[in-house]
Image: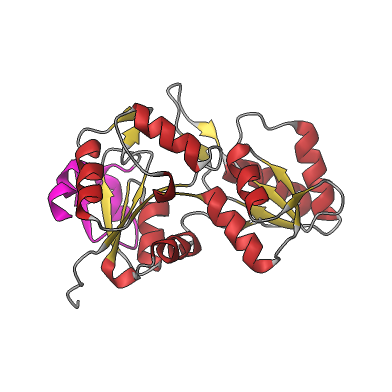
Amino acid sequence: MAERKPIESWLTDMDGVLMHEGVPVPGADRFIKRLRESGKPFLVLTNNSIYTPRDLHARLSRMGLEVPIDSIWTSALATAQFLSDQRPGGTAYVIGEAGLTTALHDVGYILTDTAPDYVVLGETRTYSFEALTKAIRLINDGSRFIATNPDHTGPSAEGALPATGSVAALITKATGREPYFVGKPNPLMMRAGLNVLGAHSETSAMIGDRMDTDVLAGLEAGMETFLVLTGLTRPEEVERYPFRPSKVVDSIADLVDAI
């Protein structure tokens, strides 16, 4: 295998890498501080579309992780950019929170339940039967089906929560229509993030805690990949996948000196 070029830009997942169940991972603050001091471009990524970058900046700041707003890249932002590229100034019926609706408003989309171009499904803690029924009927009537991310579950202090992928499966079962998922592991989200940074995949790295989203997306986008063991993936699970990360480390703290 050809030796990779030095890493000049970094992308890192948030939950499971920088924080876990609302608590910062030891060493995450040093990693972010070293990144900012290095001047190397970086993005903190999340498949969760609930929060705006401003919300996440405040949340991380309270934990002692000083991540600039412009260095936060969410599946909501990636979805909004994708839709704006596909159909500028379009219309959408949205099931989601402020992170998604704000991102769509910011690219000039009109949110409506009258013959929208797209039905866009994102993360929310208050999925309503009425909203899901409306989405199903609109898709049956011809609206295109988009979802921010394919995650079936999300973490919480009480245990797993149903996430966008699970709700998308319900809509698919009712309509026979599969959504186009924009978030990880779709390399589109990663490539769009690299474009935001003005970076190239061959000199970029992705850090994540999940083989099936973070590592796969980074791999398919052509980046070096690091798997940390502070999130969902256990060491014995790595060998079950037909692909491998460039390196497995215990935590983000082990990568501080790599910057």
Q: How many marks?
A: 0
- Point out residue 41 in the picture as x, y percentages from the top left corner: 31, 58
* Extreme residue toward the top, this view: 158
Q: Position of residue 151 (x, y in %)?
A: 51, 45
Residue 219: percent from left, percent from top: 35, 64
Give yes or no for residue 248 being in the magenta stretch: yes
The quarter holding residue 159 reads top left
Name the foreground residue: 140 vs 113: 113
Which span of residues is magenta-colored? 233-259
Left or right: 131, with 230 as reference point: right
Instruction: Return the residue found at the far bottom.
Output: 2
Q: Nearer the viewer, residue 240 or 174?
A: 174
**Does the magenta portion include 24?**
no
Tell me the quarter of the picture where residue 14 sits.
top left
Q: Is residue 115 left or right of residue 234?
A: right
Q: As displayed, is residue 221 above or below residue 233?
A: below
Q: How is the image coloured?
A: secondary structure
Q: Is residue 65 left or right of residue 213?
A: left
Q: Quadrant of the C terminus?
A: bottom left
Could you tell me if residue 128 is visible in this image?
yes
Name which residue lies at 83% across and 59% down.
Answer: 142
User: Would residue 251 be visible to someone looking at this image?
Assistant: no
- At horizontal 71% and vertical 45% (from top left) the residue drawn is 94
Residue 5, quarter of picture: bottom left
Relative image position of residue 3 (x, y in whole percent): 17, 74
192 up-or-down from 147: above or below: below
Q: Is residue 251 left or right of residue 122?
A: left
Q: Which quadrant is home to the N terminus?
A: bottom left
